[in-house]
Image (tube, rainbow, N blue to C red):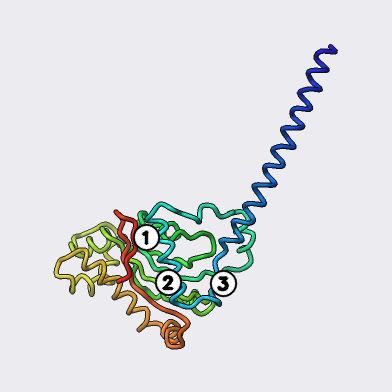
Amino acid sequence: MQALESTSTHLGKRRFLRGVLSATAAAIAIQSGLKMASASKPDSPVNLTPDGALQQLRDGNQRFAANQLTSIHHDLVLLKERTADKQEPFAAVLACADSRVPVELIFDQTIGHIFVTRVAGNMVTPEIIASLEYGVAVLGVRALLVLGHTNCGAVKAAMKAEPVPGQISVLYKHLQAAVGQSGGDVGKAIALNATHQAQLLQSASTVIRDALGTGKLRVDAAVYDVATGKVTVV
Ligand SMILES: [Zn+2]
């Protein structure tokens, strides 16, 4: 009985010590997480120029393409707390719905950094314009990027223009301008479509046009290469 008690007391001490040690480790982890998160907090878009915002996207994509991600080290719990009441994304991106184009990941960004709209063929519709206008006028994003990608199924389908189930063919009319100028070259059609949609945003939205005119925003078109992971502004 005594031996048992002794063992039990010993075990209790060990458990206690283990508890203290793991609590200390947790405290250190929380502290380093705090430091990491605050060090990597993106600049408020108010303090960024449009060129600086685009550069942040370029830099992030370079890190992604080189397998040197930094965003995965952010403390997500802290970021959720910090962004629960407000968001301050520095850029907006209109990308394709394609599963190979995870926008935050390919720009090495995390919660609260990019205002993302996605639709197959990264095309401009009234709803997309409304969403992006919110990003520009209310959230104050400094860069707006229309992002096409290599091997885009929507663009390829629009080029073939074959019968498809349901309402899929609704997408085609938005892609026709680029498809018509591509001379049958898929890569060219993808780049042309990104450029065309970026121009459409500027001609169709007074909010975007005004922000461009006052130097608060830049609008660019780019293509993401699903094989290399690299984004090229076109
Ligand atoms: Zn696509």
- At 53% from the left and 60% from the top, the residue drawn is 111
Q: Amino acid at mark 2?
A: Leu
Q: Amino acid at mark 3?
A: Ser
Q: Please, what secondary structure does the residue beneath circle 1 have?
A: loop
171 vs 57, left or right, is: left
Q: Which mark is residue 97?
A: 1
Mark 2 or mark 1: which is in front? 2
Q: Is residue 207 above or below residue 44?
A: below
Q: Quadrant of residue 94?
A: bottom left
Residue located beneath label 3 in the image: 44
- At 63% from the left and 51% from the top, the residue drawn is 32
How far apart are labels 2 and 1 at the CA level? 22 Å
Q: Is any part of residue 131 visible from this angle?
A: no
Q: Is residue 137 above or below residue 185?
A: below
Q: Are the residues at dot 2 and dot 1 in contact (C-beta closer than 8 Å)?
A: no
Q: Is mark 1 within 8 Å of ligand 1?
A: yes
Q: Tell me the quarter of the image containing the C terminus.
A: bottom left
N-term-proximal mark, 2 vs 1:
2
N-term-proximal mark, 3 vs 2:
3
46 vs 69, left or right, is: right
72 vs 157, left or right, is: right
Q: Amino acid at mark 1?
A: Ala
How far apart are labels 1 and 3 at the CA level? 28 Å
**Residue 169, percent from left and from top:** 26, 64
Residue located beneath label 2 in the image: 54
Q: Are the residues at dot 3 and dot 2 in contact (C-beta closer than 8 Å)?
A: no
- At 59% from the left and 58% from the top, the residue drawn is 37
Q: Quadrant of residue 210?
A: bottom left
Neighbourhood count class around disc 3 (C-alpha, 10 Å): few under 14, some 14–19, many 20 upward: some
**Residue 221, percent from left and from top:** 33, 72
